[in-house]
Amino acid sequence: MSGVLLWVICPRENGSSLLSLIPRNGTRTRSSRLCSRLNFSNISAAVANPSRSSEEKVHEVVLKQAALVREPRTERAQDLRRGDTDDLSNWDLLNEAYDRCGEVCAEYAKTFYLGTLLMTPERRKAVWAIYVWCRRTDELVDGPNASHITPKALDRWETRLTDLFEGRPYDMYDAALSDTVSKYPVDIQPFKDMIEGMRLDLRKSRYVNFDELYLYCYYVAGTVGLMTVPVMGIAPESKATTENVYNAALALGIANQLTNILRDVGEDARRGRIYLPRDELECAGLSDDDIFRGQVTDKWRSFMKGQIKRARMFFDQAEKGVGELNSASRWPVWASLLLYRQILDAIEANDYNNFTKRAYVGKAKKLVSLPAAYGRALIGPSKLAELVRR
């Protein structure tokens, strides 16, 4: 499962007290020894700061993207394809390409599409182009032709990505993205990293620990936040650092992906995939066989409470950055955050049965959430920060 969701759209965390997850039969199993070594007084810090090895890799990318936004645009961006777009016919084709991207967005991401209509025309079109590329990339491994996709096919897709960044688009959808990346300080690295996430889905169906899972979530969902922040724009009155805004975008992508993982446990298991960290399952007294059997037990409920707690912590981190975006871009982001976080509530309402019941947010709740998201979008950065501190 590699559900791709823009941090402003929607795509794939773990924590009640881990003390309750230690086996109580007195046997010093490997799992119980592992749990006993944990410093339970520092659980919150451990959840908020995953293993440094993956976090450091991702943080390097975040710093690079933040630096690009701070830099003035070079003449290269304006000159990149000037020779290809000067005549009226090519501009018409480019506008048609953006319109086609908008049609795809309207069909497959209806709620988000409505939110994009509040953006300026230029930003709206740019986000559509990014969305379509992400969707096409995701469908390489999760779409109808996924069984025929090979690593070489992904290599060709990455070569095609490089071409469009250099002003050589292959088709209309590529042309729209090629034009977008020439206008905004969007770097190619997050796009390449998303393709790397697709490669992981081809060769890896099990994650040993959260460090591994964190990196995967960055690849398939956190990357989208880094792609879209330059397009969304940061509010002129914001006092937040660019790095913090990017970190919030990353957090929302990871929260969304972790929520997908929790929602789709049963569906993924039927496809032979388990995304839940193996060491945390063992610490809870659970195994892969328990996942494949799909029985809701007290151990499973306790484990899921921890997973949901972690996801909510990432959502909380994301909230701190949404209000820093340009006012015209906030509503779809808030809508994504509020609606997706409610999936966690739905898992709880299903008594943690994510084996045979799919958690979803009903239309009535969506309708209630959209005005709430719009209300939050009207709150400026300074006021929102004051509310968060309270």
Image (spheres, rainbow, N blue to C red):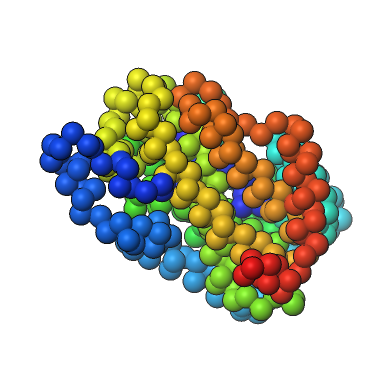
Q: Residue at x 81, y 48 (%)?
A: 371
Quadrant location of the C terminus?
bottom right
Position in image of residue 271 (x %, y %): 41, 24
Residue situated furthest right in the rendering: 88
Horizontal side, residue 292 vs residue 372: left or right: left
Residue 95 screen position, x and y as percent: 81, 50
Q: Quadrant of residue 155?
A: top left
Q: Is residue 348 left or right of residue 132?
A: left
Specify whether 238 is left or right of 292.
right
| Total numbered labels placed on residues in the image | 0
Classify 69 as above or below 112.
below
Looking at this view, is 262 or 42 the one in front? 42
Where 44 sits versus 96, above or below? Answer: below
Would residue 293 be seen by someone viewing this image from the given angle?
A: yes
Give residue 294's position: percent from left, percent from top. Answer: 39, 22
Can residue 94 be seen from the camera position used here? Answer: no
Q: Who is closer to the viewer here, 240 or 47?
A: 47
Q: Residue at x 29, y 25 (%)?
A: 289
Q: Residue at x 50, y 66 (%)?
A: 62
Q: Please name the residue shown 53% across and 50% down the image.
A: 312
Residue found at the very far left of the displayed protein: 28
Q: Nearer the viewer, residue 232 or 12?
A: 12
**Taking 356 as reference, is 203 above or below it?**
below
Does residue 144 lie above or below 321 as drawn? above
* Residue 124 percent coordinates (x, y): 77, 54
